[in-house]
Image (cartoon, rainbow, N blue to C red):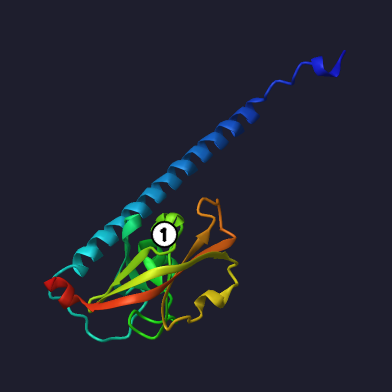
Amino acid sequence: MNRFLRPKKPVSPMQTRLLRAACYFFLAFGVLALGYAGFVFADSNAYQAIEIKKFEQPGRLSEPHILAEGDVIGEMQVPRLGLSVMVVQGDSPASLRHAVGHLAKSALPGEWGNVTLAGHRDRYFRPMRDIHLGDEVRFKTLEHNFEYVVESIEVVAPSDIRVLEVFTGHDLTLITCFPFYYVGPAPKRFVVRAREVEKMPRTELARE
C-alpha cells in the first residue's frame, strides 16, 4: 500500500486531554497578558493625568532639593506631533512605565550641558517616528519654559555614547528604541538632537 494512503493512527484520549489542556493554558495566558497590558496602559495614563493637573496648578513653586528617582521635573511637548508627556527623574523600569525619564547624569533644563531624555517607543515616544528637522520641542519646568529646535535625527547602536556628548552647551537629546514596530528588544536607538533657542520664566509666559 502506498505510504501516503495509510490510515492515520487515531488520537488517544490522553493526547486529546493534553491538547485541550494546552489550549486552555494558552488561552488563559493570553487573557492575563491582555489584562496586564490594559492595567499598565490605564495606570500610566492615570499617572500622566494626575501629574499634569498638579503641574498646571497656578502659583506652584518648586523648592530646591536633590532629585530622587521618579520625581517630576516638568512637561515635554512636541506641538506638531501632538506629543505632551511628563518627565521624571531617572530611567528605571517603573519611571519609564509612567513617564519619560531624565538620565540622572545629564544636565537639567537651564544648566550647561546635554539634557537627555529616554522613553519607550511603544508608549510616549511612539509619535517621534514622524518628527522632522526644524520641529519645535518645548520643555516646561515650574520655573521656566524652554524651547528647542530639532537639528539632527539618527539611528545608532545602543553602545554609541557619542549621542550623550555636549554640542552647543544647551542641548536636548531624546532617545528611544528602534525600529518602532519591532517585536522584542529593539537592536537600535532612535536619537533626536535639539538646540535651545529660547528660555522664558513661567511668570512672564502666564502674563502673555
Residue occupying the point 19% across, 63% down: 53
Residue 130 appears at what percent x and percent y? 43, 54
Q: Looking at the picture, which amino acid does disc 1 mark?
A: Phe
Front-lying residue, 166 or 181: 166
> As drawn, is 58 to the left or to the right of 147?
left
Count the marks: how many?
1
| x then y, percent, for residue 137 | 35, 67
Q: Say which quadrant the C terminus sits in.
A: bottom left
Observer able to see residue 44: no
Q: Confirm whether residue 107 shows in the render.
A: yes
Which residue is most to the right? 1
Quarter holding residue 63: bottom left
- Pointer 1: what residue? 125
Q: Residues within 10 Å of mark 1 (few under 14, many from 20)?
A: many
Q: With respect to residue 182, does 22 lie above or below?
A: above
* Image location of residue 15, percent across then percent down: 65, 30
Residues 15 and 88: in front is 88
Residue at x 35% of width, y 63% of height: 98
Q: Report the residue that reaches farthest toward the front.
A: 134
* Disc 1, SS: loop
Can you give x and y, in whole percent of width and height, for residue 189 in the image? 54, 64
